[in-house]
């Protein structure tokens, strides 16, 4: 089973204490500086939508957002362009990109914003490639485990959201906090 | 771009209506041909527009970051239209005729918003949906998935008959003459892709309204507006429509003019067809700012326009579809899923009480109400769409419509269910009170995504909404009932002309810097189907618009007489006095170094500039009928090659022959636009007009290419072998080239080419 369009959402630790207008400002600057590895194009501002995508940087290969889906704030990386390699490679790529954005945002809002190092969500944004079924979970479990292994996490708890109308996603609870610096340097 | 596109095609094969499936396949082929450079970019642009795939800001590959314009390094810069980069994200407009949707359609909309867009579905001021940041390569898949639930994007943009608007309360409104739904639906089906509606110089917007007094259908601002009326004829109640034509907003707004006081339903579709023919034939094609139907009516006067249309009407060949649907009117009647009941008393919950007051409306049917779902800026998420599908399944028979105020209306709610419905909506953030009042601001996309946007209409709307919500409980009822509408530029997609208080984006230079402004437009009339338009008063810097709004509303409260409505107040008091209240807001702007915020737009920290404004696609490219037909012919030849590769020799030969007929028809049509697709007629007309007159004679090959065509026609229906199909494909290609040569000759030698009826 080839999974593409992997999303990673790393949740904010505690309540969000950042004025989202400042996030809009930062995202515009990131575009001017082309601060990420992908081509960044525009900012979409959905602060007015309850439990919505929040503030999004729309890119060509991927979008980044400070997302509030499910009323949980978090940094969401949404890979749009397909990439080669194994599923585990694609999980790693998306995770590293999300961590990089979290790290940058933590530096932008030092003391006010911290991301959770022990919990994240992995989602596949394609219902055709990854129908939200137990079969999909079974098929990709070994590669999720391989990916978690590569993060040095062997006993993580992987919980599948079984709502068949939603996209395939799992919530990952790690047994020990991750060091973002290590993820970024590896 | 999705990795699953090919798989979706296989999965949905055989599950779509044939016609829609064929059209989407065609579009996919056209995408491929454009990639290969075989379709001109201008023709491709109009082709994709007619499929609903629209341009978006920054799609020229440039973005101004406040100090300078920078190139966005898209991997693939091949163009999908003049000055439009292939890989740049675009917008997809999805038609929702008269706003009617089913739970399944809501669910599908949720899926595509999540998988292909940025998770948000947006409702427009003409009841369509729009998805932003879509890759052109994904559009055929999205179209297939939509078609599988009965939705098309065809003719959502471009120079075509756009979404047919209709009252969201049709069938349940206490004030309507009758339910306009069946007529709006028949109109939609009949005009979709109609051959007589393919040669417009600009768009054509129709609308249906159930009564004259309310605003739901906004008939007066449409190219063709139908208002339901009942008349007593010989003691019997007869249905008909007051039909108005030539309305429109934009830089030169026009109220529609009366075409017929009472048109019988039997005449509605043939008259529309005749109007389309007259507009297609005589409407402006070259200067697109003068190409809407309102300008043709300006030029001719309504009487001459009527005469032309009625003369054309007489010439039309009878079409059973004009009246067939009238036998099935009853099938549109909706049934409730729960018995009628009484509304429980509203207790202490102020928020709920407020919601009931503004969002709940009695239906014509005793014991039932409609519930408006007010969406901030017309946006909602996939999760909300799915919840809405569940809610309408639970409380109704799945009856919901989008509105021109960018909201939903749930219909057939049994009154005793209202508290539970509110609770269900509240749980998913869909219980905003204030539907259709001052909190329910309408805004076009503006600088957020529109290539023509001058100022941030959505940014301003969000700001005003936040401020008004904070004090909504203090607002006088007269203020609460006002409508605010905002457009990012004079093109008026936010419908600012028909608001009590409207704004549209303009720019001014102050202290040597560009400053975003909004022109204040006051006194438009929302009721009576957009009965009159407001007029501009003064342009005010964007960041002072909240102050301007406060002053206008305070002035109104101080000076209004008794229950005087706002539009009347504006008329009585006059622009000079109102302007005096606002004048100082236009002066003494802070210097950029002391308050740089003034030199940036709402919710956008970049120093304001006009550097991102591009060429709009609102008007579409003016592509002639000839160019369209020839693109189809070339696509057919391409298809025949593909079929030959697949060893489907019969389909290959048939498609090559069809390509020849289509190319010949393109040529015939420039002289005789009534030609049908009947091959015998096409051949006869082609022979009369081009072959016998020697116009088609090739300077070197003589009649050779025409003879290929005649021979192909003579043996139409024959069985093909691999060889004969191959030969015919080559001949078809040569014939198409000869048609192009002939067309160029006609153009350069000035042979008469205006539409001539027989
Ligand atoms: S009014 Fe202007 S800015 Fe708004 S959507 Fe229309 S063209 Fe774009």
Image (tube, coloured by chain):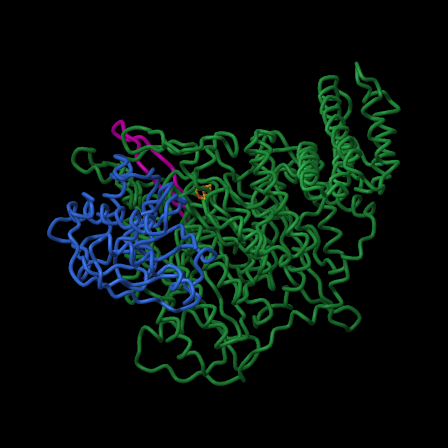
Task: Based on the picture, tell me whether residue B449 belongs to the magenta stretch.
Answer: no
Question: Between residues B585 and B505, which one lies in front from this camera angle?
Answer: B505
In the picture, measured across the screen, residue B333 lies left or right of residue B510, that is right
**Visible residue check, residue B220:** no
Magenta span dominant secondary structure: strand
**x, y percent for residue A57:** 32, 45
Q: Position of residue B35 (x, y in %)?
A: 54, 33
Q: How many marks?
A: 0
- Out of B620 and B62, give the one closest to the viewer: B62
Q: What span is colored magenta in the figure?
A: B502-521
Residue B422's image quarter? bottom left
Residue B402 against residue B713 in the figure, above or below: below
Examine the structure image and report whether residue B514 is included in the region drawn in magenta. yes
On-image quarter of the N terminus of chain B? top left
Ligand 1, by image quadrant, is top left
Residue drawn 85% across and 25% down? B691
Horizontal and vertical percent for residue A30? 25, 39
Q: Vertically, is B444 above or below B559?
A: above
- B436 lies above or below A32: below
Identified at 86% across, 31% down, the residue is: B710
Residue B100 sits in quarter = bottom right
Q: Is residue B649 visible?
A: yes
Q: Which residue is rendered at x = 86% and y = 39% of the image?
A: B680
Q: Which chain is blue?
A: A
Q: Quadrant of the C terminus of chain B?
A: top right
Q: Give coordinates of residue B71: x percent, y percent.
A: 36, 29
Q: Identify which residue, B641 or B152, lies in the foreground.
A: B641
In the picture, measured across the screen, residue B353 lies left or right of residue B755, that is left
User: In this structure image, what is the colour of chain B?
Assistant: green
Give the image quarter of residue A127.
bottom left
């Amino acid at each position: 089973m080839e999974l593409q369009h992997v999303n990673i959402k790393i949740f904010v630790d505690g309540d969000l204490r950042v004025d989202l207008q400042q996030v809009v400002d930062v995202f515009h600057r990131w575009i001017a500086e082309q601060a990420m590895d992908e081509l960044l194009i525009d900012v979409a501002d959905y602060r007015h939508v309850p439990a919505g995508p929040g503030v999004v940087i729309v890119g060509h290969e991927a979008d980044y957002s400070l997302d509030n889906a499910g009323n949980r704030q978090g940094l969401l990386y949404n890979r749009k362009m397909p990439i080669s390699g194994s599923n585990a490679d694609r999980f790693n790529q998306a995770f590293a990109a999300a961590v990089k954005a979290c790290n940058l945002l933590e530096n932008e809002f030092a003391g006010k914003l911290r991301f959770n190092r022990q919990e994240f969500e992995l989602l596949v944004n394609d219902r055709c490639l990854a129908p939200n079924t137990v079969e999909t979970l079974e098929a990709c479990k070994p590669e999720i485990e391989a990916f978690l292994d590569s993060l040095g996490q062997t006993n993580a708890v992987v919980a599948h959201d079984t709502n068949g109308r939603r996209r395939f996603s799992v919530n990952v609870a790690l047994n020990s906090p991750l060091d973002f610096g290590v993820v970024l340097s590896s | 771009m999705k990795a699953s596109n090919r798989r979706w095609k296989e999965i949905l094969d055989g599950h779509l209506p044939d016609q829609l499936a064929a059209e989407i396949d065609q579009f996919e082929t056209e995408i491929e041909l454009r990639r290969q450079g075989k379709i001109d970019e201008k023709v491709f642009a109009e082709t994709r527009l007619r499929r609903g795939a629209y341009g978006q800001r920054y799609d020229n590959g440039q973005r101004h970051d406040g100090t300078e314009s920078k190139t966005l390094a898209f991997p693939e810069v091949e163009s999908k239209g003049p000055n439009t980069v292939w890989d740049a994200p675009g917008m997809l407009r999805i038609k929702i005729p008269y706003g009617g949707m089913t739970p399944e359609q809501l669910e599908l909309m949720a899926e595509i918003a999540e998988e292909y867009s940025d998770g948000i579905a947006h409702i427009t001021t003409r009841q369509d949906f729009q998805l932003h940041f879509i890759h052109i390569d994904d559009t055929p898949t999205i179209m297939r998935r939509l078609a599988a639930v009965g939705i098309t994007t065809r003719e959502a943009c471009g120079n075509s008959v756009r979404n047919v608007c209709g009252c969201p309360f049709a069938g349940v409104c206490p004030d309507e003459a009758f339910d306009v739904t069946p007529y709006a639906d028949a109109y939609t089906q009949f005009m979709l892709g109609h051959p007589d509606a393919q040669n417009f110089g600009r768009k054509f917007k129709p609308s249906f309204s159930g009564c004259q007094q309310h605003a739901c259908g906004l008939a007066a601002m449409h190219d063709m507006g139908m208002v339901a009326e009942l008349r007593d004829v010989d003691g019997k109640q007869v249905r008909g429509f007051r039909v108005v034509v030539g309305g429109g907003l934009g830089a030169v707004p026009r109220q529609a003019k009366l075409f017929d006081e009472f048109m019988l339903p039997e005449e509605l579709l043939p008259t529309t067809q005749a109007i389309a023919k007259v507009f297609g034939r005589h409407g402006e094609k070259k200067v697109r700012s003068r190409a809407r139907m309102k300008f043709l009516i300006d030029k001719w006067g309504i009487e001459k326009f009527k005469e032309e249309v009625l003369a054309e009407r007489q010439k039309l060949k009878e079409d059973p579809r004009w009246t067939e649907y009238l036998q099935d009117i009853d099938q549109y009647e909706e049934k409730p899923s729960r018995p009628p009941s009484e509304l429980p008393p509203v207790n202490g919950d102020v928020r709920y009480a407020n919601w009931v007051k503004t969002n709940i409306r009695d239906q014509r049917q005793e014991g039932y109400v409609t519930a408006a779902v007010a969406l901030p800026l017309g946006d909602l998420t996939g999760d909300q769409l799915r919840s809405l599908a569940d809610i309408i399944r639970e409380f109704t028979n799945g009856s919901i419509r989008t509105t021109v105020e960018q909201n939903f209306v749930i219909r057939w709610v049994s009154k005793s269910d209202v508290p539970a419905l509110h609770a269900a909506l509240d749980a998913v953030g869909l219980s905003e009170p204030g539907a259709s009042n001052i909190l329910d601001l309408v805004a076009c996309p503006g600088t957020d995504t529109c290539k023509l946007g001058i100022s941030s209409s959505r940014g301003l709307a969000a700001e005003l909404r936040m401020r008004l919500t904070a004090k909504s409980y203090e607002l006088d009822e007269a203020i609460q009932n006002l409508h605010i509408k905002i457009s990012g530029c004079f093109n008026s997609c936010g419908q600012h002309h028909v608001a009590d208080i409207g704004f549209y984006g303009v720019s001014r230079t102050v202290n040597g810097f560009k400053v975003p402004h909004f022109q204040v437009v006051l006194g438009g009339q929302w009721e009576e189907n957009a009965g009159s338009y407001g007029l501009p008063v003064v342009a005010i810097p964007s960041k002072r618009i909240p102050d301007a709004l406060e002053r206008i509303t305070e002035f109104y409260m101080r000076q209004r007489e008794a229950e005087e409505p706002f539009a009347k107040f504006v008329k009585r008091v006059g622009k000079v006095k109102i302007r005096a209240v606002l004048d100082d807001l236009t002066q003494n702007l802070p210097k950029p170094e002391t308050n740089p915020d003034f030199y940036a737009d709402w919710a956008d920290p970049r120093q304001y500039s006009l550097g991102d404004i591009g060429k709009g696609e609102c008007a579409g490219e003016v592509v002639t009928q000839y160019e369209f037909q020839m693109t189809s012919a070339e696509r057919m030849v391409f298809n025949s090659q593909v079929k030959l590769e697949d060893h489907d020799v019969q389909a290959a030969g048939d498609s090559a022959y069809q390509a020849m007929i289509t190319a010949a028809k393109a040529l015939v049509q420039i002289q005789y636009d009534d030609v049908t697709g009947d091959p015998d007629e096409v051949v006869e007309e082609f022979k009369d007009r081009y072959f016998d007159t020697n116009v088609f004679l090739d300077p070197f090959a003589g009649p050779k290419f025409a003879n290929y065509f005649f021979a192909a026609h003579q043996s139409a229906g024959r069985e093909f072998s691999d060889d004969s199909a191959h030969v015919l494909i080559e001949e078809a290609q040569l014939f198409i080239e000869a048609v192009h040569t002939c067309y160029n000759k006609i153009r350069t030698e000035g042979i008469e080419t205006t539409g001539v009826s027989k």
